[in-house]
Amino acid sequence: MVTIGAIIYEPGSSIKNKTGSWRTFRPVLDNEKCVKCENCYIFCPEGCIQEDENGDFKIDYDYCKGCLICMNECPVNAITKVREEK
Amino acid sequence: MCEVKVITGTSAAAEAAKLADVDVVAAYPITPQTTCVEKLAEFVANGELDAEYIKVESEHSAMSACIGAAATGARTFTATSSQGLALMHEMLFIASGMRLPIVMMVANRALSAPINIWNDQQDSISQRDTGWIQIYVEDNQETLDSVIQAYKIAENEDVLLPVMVCLDGFILTHTVEPVTIPKAERVREFLGVYEPKHAYLDPDRPITQGPVGVPDCYMETRKQVEEAMERAKKVIKDVNEEFAEWFKRKYGNGLVEAYNLDNADTVLVAMGSICGTIKYVIDELKKEGKEVGLLRIRTFRPFPKEDVKEFLKDANNIAVLDKNISLGFNKGALGIEMASILKNKKVCNYIVGLGGRDIRIDDIKAIIDHVEKAEDDETLWVGLKE
Ligand code: SF4
Ligand code: SF4
């Protein structure tokens, strides 16, 4: 049932809305090559690249839409793409 | 006691918005609507109307501001015309899709190019499919009454759709007529306080309005608007009756108005101020013993299909007058609707009064002559220069 005017009464419902399902290419980050420049972290339009407590960069695939901006911005080619499998 | 003022159509609309005690007015001036929003600015400035008056830089913004205001549960009013209405086009869908009961006065005016500020109904007809209820009025009194009624229709929980009240530019917007102005307390009692239940922004109850509608749910939202339009037919009729009890004025059955239809084989179908002229011609012909009828379409959306069929069941010569043209189909909007409903009847379509071209008594008589002699459905442009 769609509410009248398609209103969503439950706050924060978009947290459940995983946008990663749209992805055709998956960016894969190699922390061995990474020089911690933070370019990918800054440029990712989804804000889904985060640095963990060890200083490693991690991609949250629940929200990564596969635009590959991170890959293009990485100065040392630490990010590569692989085609998503079903 | 009511008061009678001799005022223009735009003032009548402004008075009605004041009587309805609107909370927000957001508007941009455009000829021939300007005097309406000027009047409202005056009411707000001199303290007669306690409302937020939002000055915007375009009609697109005016409608956006109205949508935002209505989404907080405020009773909202705006007015526009012609290119301004066209500029609002995108936002009109959002207002109806979000089910916001905004009321707007439209001063009907031709669209450019060439630039033309005079009357025809192309502007609002072009917004036919936006999910707005459209009421076309015949005179200034009906303008005032319809704006008041519009709030009661729009805010009804069975409807929750925006309403435009369309009046012919200059013919009504800039000519004065005596208009009975009801007492503000009576109007407020008639309308009641607007208490939105479904959709309003409230910090204590966070909700999302106007979200993404994925293919999974979009079609359902469209169907809901269609169903609301269907329910609006009854609500419009009821509000018309209720209004008559309160204020002693009514307009046909709310959807259509029949004039001298009982014994008429020839019936004209039209909308707006031209119906006044047609009634005059009908009265003249009656004196000569000739019976011609008029079916005035008051609500173009929702379209009163059932009433049209019922009222025109005995008529054989049907002349549909259109102050708009669907280019590439050589018929006006009403002509197209009528042809789709009255399949086994002779329905001639007359394109009249585009860009303010006069429609004279003789033109209407010529239309009556033509439709009676016509052998089949025809479309004719009336008053064209050779
Ligand atoms: S592919 Fe796009 S969305 Fe995914 S991590 Fe890279 S920049 Fe972010
Ligand atoms: S852009 Fe490349 S090098 Fe820079 S932090 Fe991201 S993965 Fe590491």
Image (cartoon, rainbow, N blue to C red):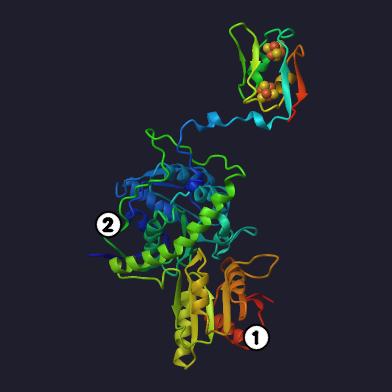
Amino acid carrying mark 1 in the image: Ala
> Which label sits in the foreground, 1 or 2?
2
Residue at image point 53% right, 87% down: B265
Q: Is residue B112 visible?
A: yes
Pick out the residue farthest to the left. B1
Please tell me whether residue B205 is drawn above or below residue B356 in the rendered image. above
**Left-right relation of B365 to B113:** left
Residue B267, image x, y percentages: 53, 82
Which image quadrant is residue A19 in?
top right
Discs 1 and 2 lie in a common subunit? yes
Per the image, label 1 sits on a secondary structure element best described as loop
Give residue B189's mark. Answer: 2
Q: Is residue B89 visible?
A: no
Residue at image point 29% right, 55% down: B188
Task: Residue under label 1, please give it.
Answer: B374
Q: Quadrant of the C terminus of chain B?
A: bottom right
Please tell me whether residue B302 is drawn above or below residue B55 in the rendered image. below
